[in-house]
Image: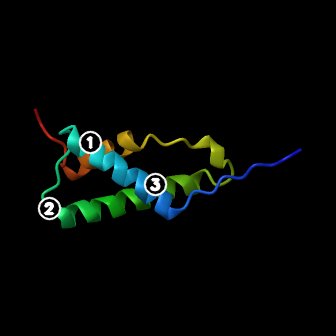
Amino acid sequence: MKKFTAVITDADIRYYIDQAATELEEDNQIRFPDSDARAEFIEDCVASEIDKYELYERNPFGYRPDYRVEVLDMADLYEYTVED
């Protein structure tokens, strides 16, 4: 019986978070005051996701993040969401 192991790196998480943030910006759902704020926000999101993956360390396939939702939730905390 073959055992499959998936490896997700910090760089993978950063890529998916950045992609989600870019899509949400293009959809005018979030807005950053400047590029420094965006970079800090991305790093905070990445750290949060790493923490969540570590919670599922014993069952790594049990955690399936929706990066758009994760970024939107964090943007709401930072008050970067666009109010209509």
Q: CA distance from mark 2 to mark 1?
A: 15 Å
* Residue 48 screen position, x and y as percent: 42, 57
Identify the residue position indicated by label 2 in the image: 34
Disc count in the image?
A: 3
- Tell me the crowding category of disc 3: few under 14, some 14 to 19, or many 20 or more residues within 10 angstroms, Cα based: many
Question: Disc 3 on helix, strand or loop?
Answer: helix
Q: Quadrant of residue 38?
A: bottom left
Q: Give me the disc on residue 24.
A: 1
* Residue 55 screen position, x and y as percent: 57, 53
Q: Residue at x 61, y 50 (%)?
A: 56
Left or right of 36? Residue 48 is: right
Answer whether labels 3 and 2 touch (C-beta < 8 Å). Answer: no
Q: Three-letter amino acid code at disc 2?
A: Asp
Q: Residue at x 12, y 57 (%)?
A: 33
Query: Quick check: 60 above or below 29?
Result: below
**Chain-order first, disc 2 or disc 1:** 1
- Res. 48 visible in picture: no
Q: Give me the disc on residue 49.
A: 3
- Tell me the crowding category of disc 1: few under 14, some 14 to 19, or many 20 or more residues within 10 angstroms, Cα based: some
Q: From the image, state whether disc 3 or disc 2 is nearer to you.
A: 2
